[in-house]
Amino acid sequence: MSLEIAQGEFFGLLGPNGAGKTTLISIVAGLARADAGSVSILGTDVAAEYRRARRLLGIVPQELVFDPFFTVRETLRFQSGYFGIRRNDAWIDEVMHYLDLTSKADVNMRALSGGMKRRVLVAQALVHKPPVIVLDEPTAGVDVELRQGLWHFVRRLNRDGHTVVLTTHYLEEAESLCTRIAMLKAGRVVALDSTRNLLASFSGLYLKLALEREALPEALAARLVGREGARVTLRLDSYAEIEAVLAGLREAGVGVTEFELEQPDLEEVFMSVMGRP
Amino acid sequence: MTGFATLFYKELLRFWKVGFQTMAAPVLTALLYLLIFAHALEGRVNVYQDVRYTAFLVPGLVMMSVLQNAFANSSSSLIQSKITGNLVFVLLAPVSYLEFFCAYVLASMARAMAVGLGVLAAAAWFVELRFDAPLWAFAFALLGSALLGTLGLVAGIRAERFDQLAGFQNFVILPLTFLSGVFYSIHSLPEFWQTLSHANPFFYMIDGFRYGFFGVSDVSPVVSLAVVGLSFVLVAAATLWMLKRGYKLRG
């Protein structure tokens, strides 16, 4: 696997379970050793210069882990200390404010809901203001409100210059957030491009029509991808073809009562890429 | 240095927050041993010529508590962090393996000392104590707790489940402490068992520690200190090697 992520990018790492997303992140974070090859963060090798590399990296782990002995504030102070930062309360307060954790500052971790624990994990990853932030499926099992709040915050971090790497199962999330995407399958990169290009490469549009009667002209049958009575879905290669389809229907004397045009989404790209042998 | 200081402080706070379980309970346990054994055996067991059995028993119990708690602290802290997964917070941070080692072992020593002093203070109510060579006692307590704190770290690193850790504690640590001369002088044993006791490093820790109280011991405190010191160096080197490689901690 060879992969380069530019500074300041919002990068998506997609793939089915077992594709190697978390393994890749573990190697980057120094939690696992690579059998071969190397990883560097802003020019710093993660194995040879592990202390420097870890300071550049903020990881939000996938598992909802916490230390039941401590409060939210203690947890964040300890995390600062592990990164060599003393008296970090001003920044801790700011992070807690943005993640809506201020009212829970002195509450024991055990007493927090799952969503709140997830926010603390995000806060922990940010205590040392890392230039690179990796979120490993941060919204798995998280309610809509938190998800929105979290993305708002992460977008802001990205605008402020942080590089963000995201793994997620929610493709619409990757589609709306990431500027570039890598798709992994069985430990290999099977697609790597900007989100826009990936969507464009899966060229084509879906034209959904409701016809007056169940009579699709012969000439359009090759485009048919779905049919439910008089409702049909046709596949087009470009917008220019709409004209020809409508003309064909007019000639056959079939009227159109409803008209809807759909663009492919990342899910289709994903399914198509993953389906390749 | 901040990484070490933070991890050390976190480890201290961890056992302090549950002090009833981590400090008060072992003091009570040792006190119960003292009351029962003293009642049952005082006047029936002859140890050193001018030392009463109860007085003989106290240093043994203090050291046993020191050793067991040093082991319990690092091993239980590490296995809990491993099983709940929160060890990842330390593993993700730029904390070196040496800082990691020192923080866990020193925190174990701190708990061990606190419990040891607690047992000593409580025992002083019942028995008149003497301190013929207190520096020796202190040296053995320090080195013994460091050794057991390190062994706890090894057990915590190796174990993947709580029952594996309990197995190590019940089938290795407990027999070795009980058979080390906490409750008797090994001179009262048949020759075969005396010889075998010399192969038990716990024997040297208890015997050397007791020397600090009565100025008498089964073997020379210098020899004991050398055995304990060498054991610590060997175990610490092995542990540091494991930590450096990330054995069972980093995949």
Image (cartoon, coloured by chain):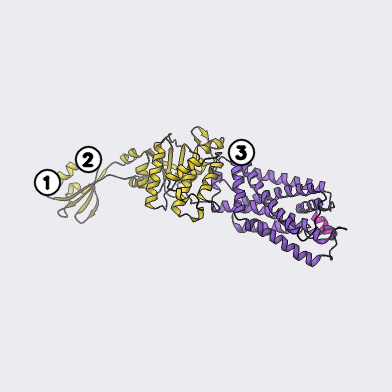
Chain colours: A yellow, B purple
Q: Quadrant of residue A227?
A: bottom left
Indicate the secondary structure of the residue bearing disc 2.
Answer: loop
Three-letter code, disc 1 = Glu
Indicate the position of residue B123 as horizontal and vertical percent values. Answer: 75, 59
Three-letter code, disc 3 = Met
Q: Is residue B115 visible?
A: yes
Distance between mark 1 and mark 2 Cα atoms: 20 Å
Chain holding disc 3: B
> Which stretch did the figure color magenta?
B190-197
Q: Which residue is mark 2?
A: A239
Residue A53 numbered mark, or none: none
Left-right relation of B223 to A79: right
Q: Which residue is mark 3?
A: B1
Indicate the secondary structure of the residue bearing disc 3.
Answer: loop
Q: Which residue is mark 1?
A: A251
Does the CB distance between marks 3 and 1 fall below 8 Å?
Answer: no
Indicate the position of residue A53 as horizontal and vertical percent values. Answer: 53, 36
Q: Which residue is nearer to you in this view: A81 or B159?
A: A81
Chain holding disc 2: A
Indicate the position of residue A151 as horizontal and vertical percent values. Answer: 39, 45
Q: Which residue is nearer to you in this view: B151 or A245?
A: B151
